[in-house]
Image: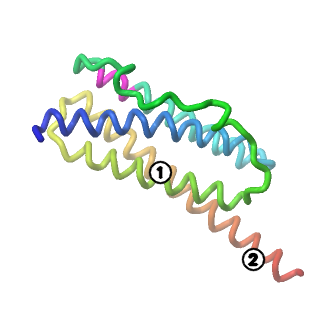
Amino acid sequence: MSKIREIQFVLERLLNQSQQDKLLYLNTADRQDLPLFKRFFNQEALIRNSLFHAISTILSTRDIAIEDVLLNRPNMAQFMRSDTTREKKNSFIKCLEQDYLLLESLEKLSRFDLDEKSRQICDKYLSKIRHSIQENELYCIEISAEEHSSHELI
């Protein structure tokens, strides 16, 4: 596969990942009771939305139509459906897993010889996603500690 085609493939994957992850974070925010967690997930959704638009711009400069790249448009009702039976911990872990996949795609893109603007965008979002992962890991630890202490009280 040529370098140009490889870069395009990674960009297309990032576009779809960021769109799906934004919806995951919005859905997760809707299920949160604590304002701190709700705010965290909503802010993370904004980052993924911003990444989606940045990748869209890069693809447009390469004369690639965004409509041709997007996978089956997600069923918004499916993503926005609330499921109160899930634990908060699972929500954090699911988002964390998706962030690791997103980070992997961004790191793969960063290994290519990109133009200056694309490089800056890639570096910016690498930093943001790494920070998101650190925050999410801290919340996972906090939730686990709360669950552990509540089990000891029983």
Residues drawn in magenta: 54-59
Q: Secondary structure at mark 2?
A: helix
Q: CA distance from mark 2 to mark 1?
A: 25 Å
Q: Are marks 2 and 1 in contact (CB under 8 Å)?
A: no
**Residue 56 colored in magenta in the image:** yes
Q: Give the residue number, with chain letter if any, for mark 1.
A: 99
Residue 53, percent across and down?
Answer: 43, 25
Q: Give the colouring mode of the picture.
A: rainbow
Residue 129 vs 149, above or below: the answer is above
Neighbourhood count class around disc 1 (C-alpha, 10 Å): few under 14, some 14–19, many 20 upward:
many
Q: Residue at x 44, y 40 (%)?
A: 17
Q: Nearer the viewer, residue 73 or 124?
A: 73
Q: Secondary structure at mark 1?
A: helix
Q: Give the residue number, with chain letter if any, for mark 2.
A: 148
Picture disc at residue 83: none
Place residue 88 in its image quadrant.
bottom right
